[in-house]
Image: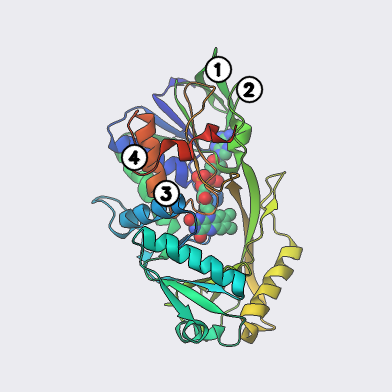
Amino acid sequence: MKETARVAIVGAGIAGASVAWHLSREGVEGIVLLEREEAPGRRASGRNAALVRQSVEDEVNLRLAVESVRFLEDPPAGFEPRPEFRRTGSLLLAGDSMGLERLDRVAAAALRNRLEVRRVGAAECARIVPILARGAVAGGLLCPSDGVIDIHALLHAFLRGAASRGARLLTSCRVEEVLVEGHAVAGLRTSAGVLETRLVVNSAGAWAGALAPPGAAKVPLRPTRRHLFVTEPVPAVDPRWPFVWDVSGPFYFRPESGGLLVCPCDEDDAPGLEETTDPRIEEEAAAGTLRLLPSLAGRGFARRWAGLRTLTPDQRFAIGEDPSLRGLFWVAGLGGHGITCSPAIGRIAADRILGKESALADAALLAPGRFS
Ligand SMILES: Cc1cc2nc3c(=O)[nH]c(=O)nc-3n(C[C@H](O)[C@H](O)[C@H](O)COP(=O)(O)OP(=O)(O)OC[C@H]3O[C@@H](n4cnc5c(N)ncnc54)[C@H](O)[C@@H]3O)c2cc1C
């Protein structure tokens, strides 16, 4: 292959897919998405907990989440397959006074941004999610508009919309090198040949740092591994429960397949970028389950997997042009909010690429060069 593209997007996870959707909606032609796997969404975007959580402490992330929920609740006509968004609500929990202070901070941030939340006592937590009755709970914060989304439908709706407007997805196509001439991007060397382009979007998830060529900024991205476990079926579980996030653990769970999906919120470095599971973390998950949900003692996990979350030092996204290399555009460091905020992430990236001010966030707060 020796082809040209107006915009080459590396990685067909939720970041790349949303950027392609938003750019194509603005009438941009010549978009090529390159994905090294046989199918899109095989990495973090297909291995996460599917939570849509607006109730967070950081107000930049909170505003992007609130904006994204508007999109997810009522996507534009033709956004198909329409991803089911189950507005189950969320229940943040605290087990101690430090945790309760944290809930106060989340509540204050939510109220400042007109996100409806409500403080609830331990007894009400157990009324809403009865399986918490014997757990270590000091109080909670309910956010009724949080929920759970069909992540596969969401990814494919972005991709399908972009494809319907001419964007091309190349799977099994590994980008080996970003080609540079002077201080500007000139193309990509891929496993299928060279693609000439002046604009590369680096949405390669945990691999974004490794993709950046010499001459690009050193964006301090930290890929970390996180595990999820699904218990065997538990008759007491009601699929309508909100997802529950214990900030004191930290630990979260939600109904899944007749049992519970649980997460011990592990955050180990993942130097080899391995997604293999670690029995030590399974023990942590079992201990967390026992602490919060003692009635599940002795119940095993039926399924387990791990994925990579890529963090920045301030836990905000890195969206914007590289400060040192013209034509390299970062959409990376989505941490634990990439699914929730995917509509806003794609919107902001498309605005910036087209040289427009984004109404959603101040460019400086997300600039990839802000750490240097
Ligand atoms: C266990 C876990 C639970 C999570 N839970 C939630 C949650 O409940 N809610 C939420 O909002 N977020 C959650 N997240 C975070 C969310 O999944 C991520 O923020 C998001 O999926 C990141 O998307 P991405 O497109 O940046 O990365 P990815 O999905 O990893 O996509 C990057 C893509 O780039 C491709 N690629 C990499 N290098 C190359 C190359 N050289 N050439 C071609 N292709 C390449 C990869 O194959 C991959 O498909 C969770 C993450 C994990 C791991």
Local packing at callout 3 (Cα closer than 10 Å; few below 14, some 14-19, many 20+) is many
Q: Are marks 1 and 2 in contact (CB under 8 Å)?
A: yes
Which of the numbered marks, if any, corresponds to residue 21? Answer: none
Return the residue nearer the eye: 46 or 250.
250
Determine the residue positioned at 32% across, 53% down: 71
Which of the numbered marks, if any, corresponds to residue 214? Answer: 2
Residue 267 at what x, y percent from top left?
66, 56
Q: Amino acid at mark 2?
A: Pro
Q: Secondary structure at mark 2?
A: loop
* Mark 3 vs ligand 1: CB below 8 Å: yes
Q: Amino acid at mark 3?
A: Ser
Q: Secondary structure at mark 4?
A: helix
* Distance CA(mark 4)–CA(mark 2): 29 Å
Residue 265 at what x, y percent from top left?
62, 62
Lower position in the chain sequence, tag 3 or tag 1: 1
**What residue is shown with label 4?**
22
Residue 167 vertical position relative to residue 159 in the rendered view, above or below:
above
* Distance CA(mark 3)–CA(mark 4): 11 Å
Which of the numbered marks, if any, corresponds to residue 180? Answer: 1
